[in-house]
Image (cartoon, rainbow, N blue to C red):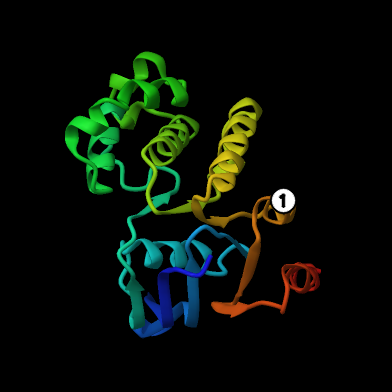
């Protein structure tokens, strides 16, 4: 676990907001965040709603440019797995899966060979060939999970999706994630579930008001999180 896949150096993100009297105020979900993601590790990110967790994953994936700081990708393919993240709602699940795999750098013919496997895993049936706009949030989540786990990137960013959908698929997704982790898949996992982070991750950090907090060990970090949530 010594190879660094992603490096974040003093990352900050600011969003403009309208203030009273027409003035401008700023929300700063990330404030000077520095973090390395190592190959083969499972990194958990904990924090309250609005703490900046999803913003951090978007920065890691390259879909959001920070206002300051540097994101250094050391040649890794990165996929963000979030509810309907990156889907074209007018295209079918099949076409979204095809383009998603190609965006990860895979050849078209290689992705085509995996489409039926994605369809079966996502349990979408005929909906796989329907536009994504007709999907429920749970169906979109299953599709995204299937794409990102069957067509594996170097770094898989997982934003809360293990907590949605029916109990059957949640258990299936957790089993798959544990198998991938055991095989050395690099994962960054955002979850509200302290237990899920403690079980699946070998390192965790906390985002608190846009700033990174962590103890010397994972156990220390989880204790800090418990204190912050009281």
What residue sits right under mark 1 in the picture? 199
Residue ID at (79%, 67%): 226
- On screen, residue 105 versus residue 229, left or right, reads left
- On screen, residue 200 versus residue 55, left or right, reads right
Is 159 placed above or below 152 here? below
The image quadrant where one finds the C terminus is: bottom right
Residue 174 appears in view: yes
Is 15 or 85 nearer to us in this picture? 85
Residue 46 screen position, x and y as percent: 63, 64
**Residue that lies at the very extreme toward the top in this rendered image:** 126
Residue 167 screen position, x and y as percent: 66, 29
Residue ID at (45%, 29%): 139
- On screen, residue 99 versus residue 73, left or right, reads left
Residue ID at (28%, 20%): 129
Is 24 or 52 nearer to us in this picture? 52
**Residue that lies at the very extreme toward the front in this rendered image:** 2
Q: Secondary structure at mark 1?
A: helix
Q: Quadrant of residue 215?
A: bottom right
Residue 91 appears in view: no
């Amino acid at each position: 676990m010594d190879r660094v896949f992603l490096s974040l150096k003093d990352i900050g993100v600011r969003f403009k907001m309208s203030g009273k009297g027409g003035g401008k105020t700023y929300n700063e979900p990330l404030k000077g965040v520095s973090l390395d993601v190592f190959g083969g590790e499972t990194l958990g990110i904990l924090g309250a709603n609005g703490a900046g967790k999803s913003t951090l994953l978007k920065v890691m994936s390259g879909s959001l440019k920070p206002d300051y700081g540097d994101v250094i990708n050391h040649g890794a393919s990165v996929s963000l797995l979030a509810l309907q993240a990156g889907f074209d709602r007018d295209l079918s699940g099949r076409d979204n899966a095809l383009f998603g795999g190609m965006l990860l750098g895979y050849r078209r013919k290689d992705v085509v060979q995996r489409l039926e496997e994605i369809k079966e895993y996502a349990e979408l049936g005929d909906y796989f060939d329907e536009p994504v706009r007709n999907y429920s949030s749970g169906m979109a989540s299953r599709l995204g999970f299937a794409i990102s786990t069957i067509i594996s990137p170097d770094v898989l960013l997982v934003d809360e999706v293990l907590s949605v959908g029916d109990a059957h698929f949640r258990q299936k997704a957790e089993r798959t994630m544990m198998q991938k982790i055991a095989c050395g898949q690099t994962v960054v996992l955002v979850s509200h579930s302290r237990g899920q982070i403690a079980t699946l991750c070998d390192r965790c950090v906390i985002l608190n008001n846009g700033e990174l907090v962590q103890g010397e060990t994972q156990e220390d970090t989880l204790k800090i999180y418990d204190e912050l949530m009281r």
